[in-house]
Image (cartoon, rainbow, N blue to C red):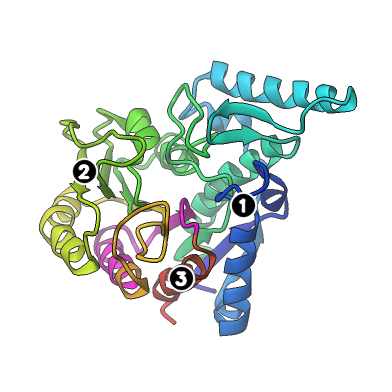
Amino acid sequence: MNATGYFTHKDCWKHEMGPGHPECPERLDAIEDRLLITGVGDALDRREAPLAALGDIELAHDRMLIAAIRGLSDRLVDDIKAGGPAYAQIDPDTSLNVHTWNAALRAAGATIAATNAVLAGEMENAFCAVRPPGHHAERGKAMGFCFFNNIAIAAKYALERHGLKRVAIVDFDVHHGNGTEDIIRGDQRVLMVSFFQHPLYPFSGAESRESNMVNLPVPAYTKGMDVRELIEMMWIPRLEEFKPEMIFICAGFDAHREDDLGRMGLVEQDYAWITQRVKDVARRHSKGRIVSSLEGGYNLSALARSVEAHIRVLADL
């Protein structure tokens, strides 16, 4: 058995939000190229992401939101036929094209399929190279490049469809995962641990007092060693105490020092270290079960190197 699965789909390349947008299909190209030239890709169990069932997306999202995104997508197809614009705007940074609906279903479908495969024992852990990302999508609102919350859906799926009692969500994106927090707030079956630059979009998380959240807002220019110290002090004891049966990772790599969408100072070795610490917890309490899904990371070279570092640890390479 290959220890690490790799879930993606060509539909995830077709979603795009216009020229010059940082959340672009080239992000997936950069990751694929890096895994190819380093040989890391050869060690992975590659699988095609299915389309998520709408009933599974409803575990984390209001039916109205799902209907609204689908309606926008259908209307866009008609508008384009009539010579209208190629994009429908959700917010100033987020828009959909005619392929976004399928891409979003594949992204959520990847984390669900990965959850099934890991829980079936077909692989120890998995990484989902998908887009659009998910962690800003709230229960009733798409925003911040995100439509459906891929990791929150998978975490709820593990609880509701597989009967797990406790799951953890780890979020190391430079931005606060407001959507994930909105969806799992107060659900004592889920522990969410995160750090994020503050203040920075979406300007939330620092005031959270939810008992199932460990939010670590850090100032701009925070370096990797400081983040490691905070994780050791604040995340690890809570994770050890919680004893999750499975761990889900919102894997954003935009806290890298080369990434212009944030102002933090992490490097690849920091992502490897964080992944190893999470993996240690998973091996102790969760039978090693981890599902990780791509969130941010917009400097293509830094993103590709960081994902490689993350996957090397997951796959024991």
Of residues 237 and 300, which is closer to you in this image? 300
Task: Give the residue drawn at x 62%, y 40%.
Answer: 104
| Quadrant of res 272 | bottom left
Task: Give the residue drawn at x 74%, y 39%.
Answer: 99
Q: Which residue is mark 2?
A: 215
* Residue 249 included in the magenta stretch of the image: no
Looking at the rendered structure, the kind of residue marked 2 is: Asn
Q: Mark 3 packing: few (<14 Cα in 10 Å), some, or many (20+)?
A: many
Task: Give the residue drawn at x 24%, y 64%.
Answer: 284
Give the CA distance from mark 2 to mark 1: 28 Å
Looking at the rendered structure, the kind of residue marked 1 is: Cys
Looking at the rendered structure, the kind of residue marked 3 is: Ile
Where 128 falls versus 272 (above or below)? above
Seen in the image, is 63 located left or right of residue 317? right
Of residues 111 and 227, which is closer to you in this image? 227
- Mark 1 residue element: loop
Quadrant position of the C terminus in the picture: bottom left
The location of residue 184, given as percent across then percent down, is 33, 32
Where 194 falls versus 190 (above or below)? below
Q: Mark 1 packing: few (<14 Cα in 10 Å), some, or many (20+)?
A: many
Where 135 falls versus 8 (above or below)? above
Q: Which residue is mark 1?
A: 24
Quadrant position of the N terminus in the picture: bottom right
Task: Give the residue drawn at x 44%, y 55%.
Answer: 291
Q: Which residue is mark 3?
A: 311
Magenta residues span 272-298
Q: Are marks 1 and 3 in contact (CB under 8 Å)?
A: no
Number of numbered tags placed on the structure image: 3
